[in-house]
Image (spheres, rainbow, N blue to C red):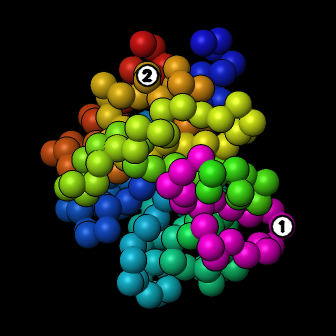
Amino acid sequence: MSESKTSLFRLLVITPEEAYPQETQWVNRLFNSGLQSLHLRKPGWSELQLLCYLEQIEACYHPQIMLHHGAGVPEQLRVKGLHFQQHTLPQVKSGYCVSCSVHSWQEYLAVEEQVTYAFISPFFNSISKQGYRANPELQVMPAEANAQKAVALGGVNSSRIEEVRHLGLGGAALLGAIWQSVNPLAAFLEIQKKLYHG
């Protein structure tokens, strides 16, 4: 794969649902070490809780953060955009990125024109969700799919990242590989090294 293709590959991190010790400090370190985008996903959190979390992230990184479950917050902060469920994709204010989650290529093809990118899962056996098994059909991307908008989610770690890139997808989202590690930064750097340096 060419250098230009590799440089276009999105490497994203999704926050854990439950609080991780010193989580926002780790997030700042991840951004400082080259993280391109963070998905802030905290189901059940209030807008105030999200704002308090964001206040602990260096302001220069806010434009690299996608919010889940907090559609009112972007009016107050310079975040990157919003992540929705597939069936709730709205008409969003121009200027924000929009992403969603899908679980088949058929679902992906139905939304790819509406989103900046979409998570497609479970790509491999999940690390964070026990028993959430890979869907083998996701390994074969339809010829008509816009590969650059497809982001693999589920079971992506340092041993799988190159496989995702070589399949032609536009990116990968990391969750369990980062937050089930004792050192999230070291885990991220290992994946980043595998991706960009082989």
Q: Rate crowding at label 2 as few (under 14), some (14 to 19) or many (20 or more) other CA atoms within 10 Å.
A: some
The quarter of the rendered structure image containing the N terminus is: top right
Residue reaching furthest to the right: 94
**Residue position marked by numbered label 1 in the rendering:** 94
Q: Is residue 102 magenta?
A: yes
Residue interval drawn in magenta? 86-105
Q: Nearer the viewer, residue 149 or 15?
A: 149
For residue 194, side relative to residue 149 (left or right):
left
- Residue farthest along the left direction in this orientation: 182
Residue 85, image x, y percentages: 56, 70
- 20 up-or-down from 168: above or below: below
Q: Residue at x 39, y 73 (%)?
A: 42
**Amino acid on which the number 2 mark rests in the picture:** Glu
Image point 79% across, 74% down: which residue? 91
Residue corresponding to mark 2: 162
Q: Is residue 109 above or below residue 158?
A: below
Residue 62 falls in which quadrant of the image?
bottom right
Which residue is at a point 73% across and 75% down the rendered structure image? 90
- Asked if residue 30 shows in the view, the reply is no
The verdict on residue 101 being magenta is yes
Which badge, 1 or 2, comes first in the chain's sequence? 1
